[in-house]
Image (spheres, rainbow, N blue to C red):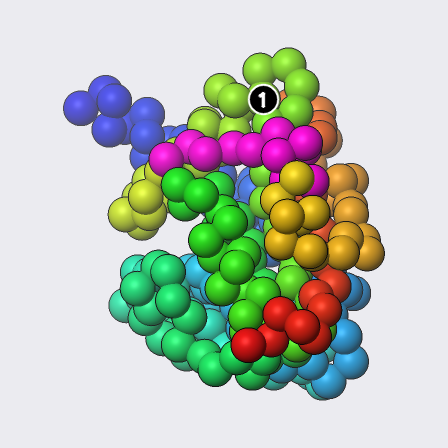
Amino acid sequence: MQKGAFARAVKSLHGSLIFSRRVEQLARHLAELLPRNASVLDVGTGDGSLALRIGRLRPDVTLRGIDLLVRPHTAIPVEAFDGVHFPAADRSFDVVMFVDVLHHTDDPRVLLREARRVARQCILIKDHAADGWLSGPTLRLMDWVGNAGHGVRLPYNYWTPAQWQQAFRELEINVEVNRTELGLYPGWLNWLFGRSLHFVVRGAVSPKHGA
């Protein structure tokens, strides 16, 4: 009972202090990096609140959401997919976007390859990097607080910056923008939970990977 009460209190704190600010900050960063008039496939949309906010900031773009677990109520329409294959043709979207999705997989390369197949212009990624003191335990705590209540799989697969860079080289994803100062948390919480644990990357893709 005490454990359940603690979990509810932590999740309530997350909702009041972190979630809304996170959505606003991430929407701003991601909206700035989307090409003009882009069609965007948002993989792992969740409740759709972030995609909705991006759409309001960038009314010129169109967003389609897919997720392994479709929630009963979402801010935008979300289609189910099997967690591996995107329900989209080769080179059918300008952008494929992942927001805190890839670390929930056993191997991010699987979905990154699928993104290479579908994207015409670029792949936009927000994720974590296991970088620095106590990065692993800190990321595990954040992951549990933000996702455990939604039935999201939590393998806690956090890559180091070197592993991300190696994957981008292997898949020929040309990193054009890499942001690590995202300002997701207020005040001292940003020192504790921000640090260098988060990044947003825009990676260009080449036409030869289209088919």
The residue closer to the viewer here, 158 or 69, is 158
What residue lies at 78% left-to-right and 47% top-to-bottom?
178
Q: Is residue 151 visible from the viewing direction of this image? A: yes
Q: Nearer the viewer, residue 36 or 20?
A: 36
Query: In what quadrant of the picture does the N terminus appear?
Result: top left
Question: How far across and down, in percent of the image, does residue 138 sit?
Answer: 53, 23
**Is 162 contained in the magenta span?**
yes
Q: Position of residue 14 (x, y in %)?
A: 48, 39
**Res. 36 image quadrant:** bottom right
Q: Is residue 38 above or below residue 166?
A: below
Q: Position of residue 33 (x, y in %)?
A: 77, 64
Q: Quadrant of residue 73?
A: bottom left
Residue at the limit of the structure toward the left, as seen here: 1
Tell me the quarter of the image containing the C terminus: bottom right
- Residue 122 on the magenta segment: no
Q: Is residue 164 above or below residue 111?
A: above
| Residue 137 versus residue 160 in the image, above or below | above
Amino acid type, residue under disc 1 in the picture = Ser
State the extent of the magenta-drawn residues as a range: 155-165
Q: Measured from the top left, where is residue 90 in percent x and y? A: 52, 79
Residue drawn at the location 45% of the way across and 27% of the way down: 141
Whether residue 96 is visible: no
Q: Secondary structure at mark 1?
A: helix
Residue lying at 49% horizontally and 64% vertically, measured from the top left: 114
Is the residue marked by circle 1 packed among few (<14), some (14-19), or many (20+) residues within 10 Å? some
Q: Residue furthest top?
A: 133
Q: Residue at x 54, y 70 (%)?
A: 117
Instruction: Read off the residue under disc 1.
Output: 135
